Image (tube, helix red, strand yellow):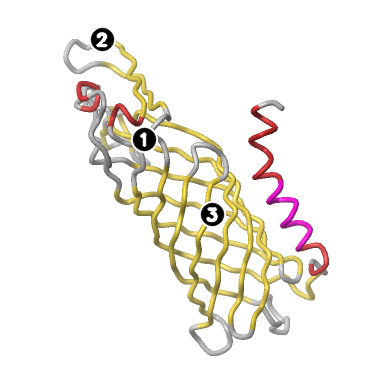
Amino acid sequence: MSAKHRLCIPGCGGILVLLGLLGPVAARADNVAAEAAVWAGGNLAWVGDARFSADGQRTQDGQPARFSATGRQLGIVQPWLVTIGASMSVIPWRHVALGLEFATSVHGVADRAPTAPTLALQTDTGSVSSYRVGGNLTGILPVGRFSLRLGATLSYNHLGVPVTVFDKVPCGKSGASRCYPSAGFDKFSLEPRLSATVPLSPGGLLHLLVYIGTDVVPPNGLSVGAGLLVHLDSFGGRRRSR
């Protein structure tokens, strides 16, 4: 069995189970509802063997160069990344939501002593950053006042660290700022996620959201967090049980 097929077993199996569970309840909704959520949490990433690389111009001599090091060499093995995110979803079928999400880290540092201190000194390992963007498919099961959700998120992930021996380059929306090039590691992730919501306001407009998920695509990761979710029924539609 190839590595590609072995990798697909947990991820593809989870998707098939999810589709099987959603099949009986995925009746067309009377009206399409929408949801928006914001959250804060943390991501634990196992990236000791991941390779971080970047191209730039060395400040010392002005020559082009390439930086490359593993997470373990930089002391970035299992960093805890404080993350904020937002998502928007539609519910075209009863108990089934389709959505898009974006998340970015606001704090991350190296968590181990580097095995290659010379390489680590060429970076700012106190400024580990990450972001992800992707889509999700979620099944919604109402349980009394609560709502349990089982879903899967497919996303593009980037994790990086500034290379301080390179000249700064334009950055930001307008390019007016200047930042060190980032030695990055990129991957696609498939994250089965379990979440729950509980209403905070009469009528079910505002909800508390909590979640936990795990990335099944190596290098693996774990995410947890909490936030607020706003549920909007379609115009002119009757409110339905969630």
Q: Which residues are magenta?
A: 13-21
Q: Are marks 3 and 1 in contact (CB under 8 Å)?
A: no
Q: Position of residue 150 (x, y in %)?
A: 63, 63
State the image quarter where residue 234 is shown.
Answer: bottom right
State the image quarter where residue 95 is shown.
Answer: bottom right
Amino acid beneath label 2: Gln
**Horizontally, is 80 left or right of 58 in the view?**
right
User: How would you rate the neighbour count of disc 1 (Cα within 10 Å): few for under 14, some for 14-19, many for 20 or more?
Assistant: many
Quadrant showing the C terminus: bottom right
User: How would you rate the neighbour count of disc 2 (Cα within 10 Å): few for under 14, some for 14-19, many for 20 or more?
Assistant: few
For numbered disc 2, what is the local secondary structure?
loop
Q: What residue lies at 38% left-to-right and 24% top-to-bottom?
A: 53
Amino acid beneath label 3: Glu
Q: Position of residue 101 (x, y in %)?
A: 54, 54
Above or below — where is 46 with respect to 235?
above
Q: Are marks 3 and 2 in contact (CB under 8 Å)?
A: no
Separation (CA) of disc 3 from disc 2: 39 Å
Quadrant showing the N terminus: top right
Q: Disc number at residue 101? A: 3
Q: Disc number at residue 160? A: 1
Q: What residue lies at 46% left-to-right and 54% top-to-bottom?
A: 223
In the picture as drawn, the residue positioned furthest to the bottom comes out as: 202
Circle 2 sits on which residue? 63
Above or below — where is 236 with respect to 98?
below
Q: Position of residue 122 (x, y in %)?
A: 22, 25
Separation (CA) of disc 3 from disc 1: 20 Å
**Horizontally, is 140 left or right of 102 in the view?**
right
Q: Disc number at residue 198? A: none
Q: Earlier in the sequence, mark 1 or mark 2?
A: 2
